[in-house]
Amino acid sequence: MARPPRSVKFLDYLLSEPVQRQVSAVGGGFAARQDIKATDAHATELAVLMKGVDVFEPDWKDIDKNLGGYLDAWRKATGS
């Protein structure tokens, strides 16, 4: 059985529960995993900043399917 590349091992490590629990406290950001709920001071500040903010979640299947049309519309609208 082949070993996973180092990049996969590194990403697995970064997404592990112990590391994700430190993202807010150490890096001041949001955990990538939705099952991790930080409660440190940075997390509290971020929660206040995000209150009332709607986070846009793109429909990646739609984007993949229609990317060419979206790019054409963007170029037309921006003259680029």
Image (tube, helix red, strand yellow):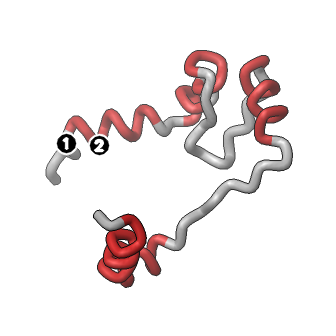
Could you tell me the amino acid type at mark 2? Val
Question: What is the number of callouts on the image?
Answer: 2
Secondary element at image label 2: helix
Task: From the viewer's perspective, tell me whether residue 46 is left or right of residue 52.
Answer: left
Considering only vertical position in the picture, is 2 above or below 38?
below
Distance of mark 1 from mark 2, alpha carbons?
Answer: 5 Å
User: Quadrant of the rendered structure where residue 39 is?
Assistant: top right
Residue for point 74% across, 55% down: 54
Nearest the eye: 29 or 22? 29
Could you tell me the amino acid type at mark 1? Pro
Secondary element at image label 1: loop
CA neighbours of label 1 inside 10 A, class few (<14), some (14 to 19), many (20+): few
Residue for point 78% across, 17% down: 41
Nearest the eye: 16 or 30? 30
Which numbered tag is attached to residue 21? none
Task: From the viewer's perspective, tell me whether residue 17 is left or right of residue 51.
Answer: left
- Residue 34 location (% of width, % of height): 66, 48
Considering only vertical position in the picture, is 1 above or below 45?
below
**Are the residues at dot 1 and dot 2 in contact (C-beta closer than 8 Å)?**
yes
Tell me the residue that label 2 is attached to: 8
Tell me the residue that label 1 is attached to: 5
Residue for point 53% across, 27% down: 19
Residue for point 42% across, 71% down: 77
Task: From the viewer's perspective, tell me whether residue 8 is left or right of residue 31.
Answer: left
The reply to whether residue 76 is visible in this rendering is yes
